[in-house]
Image: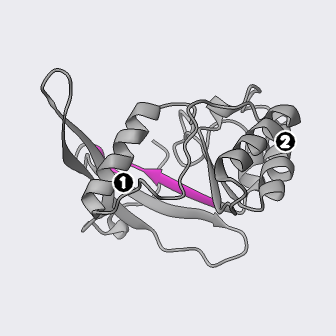
Amino acid sequence: VGEGLRGLNKRFKAWSAYNKVSLDEAPLYLSGRSADFMTATSAHEVVDSIRYATAGDSISLIVIDTLARNMSGNESSPEDMAVFIGIIDRVVRQELNCTVLVIHHPGIHDKTRGRGTNALHSAIDTDIRIYHPDREIYPNTVRVECCKQKNEERVDAFMLDFHIVDWGRIDSSGQRVKSGVLIPSDQSPDLFSARSE
């Protein structure tokens, strides 16, 4: 986690409260800092830490949040992105035999693609875009669409609503602590289409 660690912990608690499922014993591990996946040495340190934390258990998924916070290079440079992709693939994915999910911000002017070079999009198997189709009319609704699926059939687009959850905790100032969870929306994805602004 390169950003939003406090918020992520609150989201976990909101998800747990909303779904009435405890995550206390879940095989879920959360790092408290980012890493630099531009060097194999740093990536091997991450792999070693994961192996230590999981005590040799098999790993299904690693989430890198976000690309920019876990890369010392320039995300607009095809050469730097090639290094990042190569290290993620060879050192992390292959050594741990798992799926790697990289969260990446959209472009500043073109919201239909990730920031920087197209090298990442070309190298990945699956590209899922999540965005607000209309913040003014539907401020708490996001559209999820599959923009690329290399080896499988693409899933249909769907909508999710951000639902606020109060899990009963009071902070030091006496305020109720709340966060949100994404739940299926009644809105149809057919009402919205990808747009670049």
Q: Between 140 and 188, which is closer to the camera in this rendering?
A: 140
Q: Name the residue under label 2.
A: 82
Q: Position of residue 99 (x, y in %)?
A: 69, 60
Q: Position of residue 117 (x, y in %)?
A: 73, 39
Judge left or right: residue 86 versus residue 133.
right
* Picture layout, residue 83 above or below residue 60: above
**Which of the two discs, 1 and 2, labels the residue nearer the N terminus?**
2
Three-letter amino acid code at the position of disc 2: Ala
Q: Distance between the residues labelled 1 and 2?
A: 30 Å
Q: Is residue 131 magenta?
A: yes
Q: Between 144 and 184, which is closer to the camera in this rendering?
A: 184
| Residue depicted at x 68% and y 61% | 57
Q: What element carries label 1?
A: strand
Count the numbered circles shown. Answer: 2
Q: In which quarter of the image is the N terminus?
A: top right
* Picture layout, residue 133 above or below residue 117: below
Mark 1 and mark 2 residues within 8 Å of each other at the beta carbon: no
Q: Where is residue 182 in the image (x, y as percent from the top left)?
A: 33, 56
Q: Mark 1 points at which residue?
A: 142
| Residue depicted at x 30% and y 49% | 14
Question: As drawn, which residue projects farthest toward the top?
Answer: 173
Q: Position of residue 109 (x, y in %)?
A: 53, 35
| Residue depicted at x 33% and y 47% | 13
Magenta part of the chain: 127-135
| Residue depicted at x 72% and y 69% | 150
Q: Can residue 81 be seen in this view?
A: no
Occupied quadrant, residue 80: top right
> How many neighbours does mark 2 have within 10 angstroms: few (below 14), some (14-19), or many (20 or more)?
some
